[in-house]
């Protein structure tokens, strides 16, 4: 399996209702850490963290510090924002999940 290394801060999303802002940065050797602020933390905080973690793992990201500010985003929006933030945070221009 490939591994992506975060080389700079990557940010995606907005603070609009039903969206999420994702910021991803290096966390070398410390695994995936998620700092979540959410308007729906009590109801969906665990699910949001799960979607973020599973999306990162499926992309081959093993070490990342994620700061997420959620305003009620759906899982598909969370996944899209995570993928975009990772794309902005990796050094190379070719990503293994893209079509050739």
Image: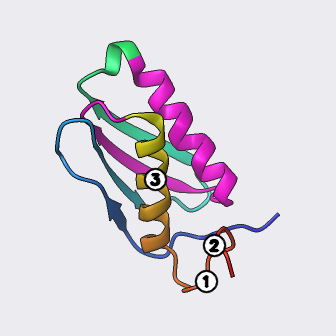
Q: Residue at x 47, y 42 (%)?
A: 76
Mark toward the start of the polypeptide (3 vs 1): 3
Quadrant where the N terminus is found in the figure: bottom right
Residue sitting at x 50%, y 25%: 47
Residue at screen point 49% across, 64% down:
86
Quarter of the image for residue 48 reads top left
| Residue, far left | 16
Residue occupied by mark 3: 80
Q: Is residue 31 visible?
A: no
What is the magenta range? 44-73
Q: Read off the residue under disc 2.
A: 98
Q: Horizontal and vertical percent for residue 97?
A: 66, 67
Query: Helix, strand, or loop for circle 3?
Result: helix
Q: Is residue 53 above or below residue 94?
A: above
Residue annotated with mark 1: 94
As for residue 27 lying within the magenta part, the answer is no
Q: Residues within 10 Å of mark 2 (few under 14, many from 20)?
A: few
Q: Residues within 10 Å of mark 1 (few under 14, many from 20)?
A: few
- Percent x, y of residue 71: 24, 34
Q: What is the number of the mark on residue 22?
A: none
Inter-mark Cα distance, 3 to 2? 13 Å
Pointers 2 and 1 in contact (C-beta within 8 Å): yes
């Amino acid at each position: 399996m490939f591994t992506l290394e975060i080389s700079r801060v990557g940010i995606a999303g907005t603070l609009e209702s039903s969206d999420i802002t994702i910021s991803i940065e290096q966390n070398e050797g410390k695994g995936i850490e998620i700092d979540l602020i959410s308007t729906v933390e009590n109801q969906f905080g665990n699910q949001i963290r799960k979607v973020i973690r599973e999306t990162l793992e499926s992309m081959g990201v093993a070490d990342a510090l994620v700061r997420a500010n959620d305003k009620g985003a759906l899982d598909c929006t969370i996944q899209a924002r995570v993928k975009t933030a990772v794309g902005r945070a990796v050094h190379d221009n070719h990503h293994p999940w893209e079509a050739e």
